[in-house]
Amino acid sequence: MVGGEEARYIVKVLRLRLGDGVLLFDGSGKEYGGEIEKVSKDQVAVRIMGESCPLVESPLELILIQGIPKSEKMDLIVKGTTELGVSGIWPFFSSRTIPRWKDSTLSKKVSHWEKIALSAAQQSGRTRVPEVRAPLPFEDMVNEVDNLKDSFLKIVLWEEERERKIKDVLRGMPQPAGICFLIGPEGGFSPDEINCFKRKGCIPIHLGNRILRTETAGITLLSIIQYEWGDLG
């Protein structure tokens, strides 16, 4: 049984009717083919006819650690990185983060981002929905980075890094099981913040001569990683 917004999407947007075929996923990697048996205002009954585990997810565990940007830029970040195969999105507040929300607003923001991630996963044919975490203070996020498995490659994008490019890192070591990549808000990271990340094993890198906006930097970096080591291209 499919209910709520998903049922309304099937009926109102896709305009599917009795007997039409549908493809469902449970967010854990499984996909189910079925046929619509019954349609009501808020529910769609589907007869499951088959189950599969399609290979549509990246072989890498990819975690975006994103400094919270202004206005609605986070919506674009969640949507774009989900389409590209990110596993988790961990927002955080840094010294240069401008939005400072109350707890009630934070909860609404996370719920909103989760819906965007679900929609983007559906649109792009994924079988897993990335985990969108509640934003953390900078110090707590540093601890989360420190607690990642030793098999993770940790990279932080910093506009003041001049020597090490992303291709130097990707082509200079064996492929890891997972990668976390850290992107600052509009003002980037402070030198003190970069030093904190360095102490936790993060490698500062840059993408080239141009400085990208925070809402495009993570998408660009993820595209490069997926092309070099993942399943893009």
Image: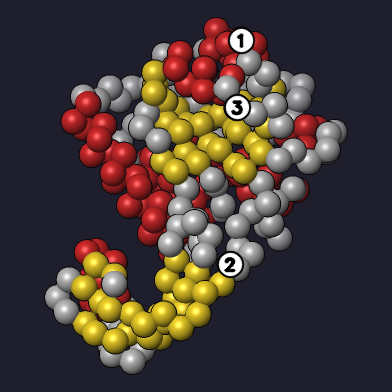
Q: Which residue is mark 1?
A: 195
Task: Name the quadrant of the C terminus.
Answer: bottom right
Distance (Cα) linking label 1 and label 2: 42 Å
Nearest to the eye among marks 1 and 2: give it.
2
Query: Element under label 3?
Result: loop
Query: Toward the viewer: 191 or 162?
Result: 191
Image position of 212 (left or right of 99): right
Mark on residue 148? Answer: 3
Distance (Cα) linking label 1 and label 3: 18 Å
Q: Which residue is mark 2?
A: 53
Nearest to the eye among marks 1 and 3: give it.
3
Extreme top residue here? 192
Q: What is the tally of numbered marks visible in this picture?
A: 3
What's under tag 2, amino acid-wise? Cys
Residue 87 visible, this orientation: yes
First-in-chain label (2 vs 3): 2
| Mark 3, other Cα within 10 Å: few <14 / some 14–19 / many ≥20 | some
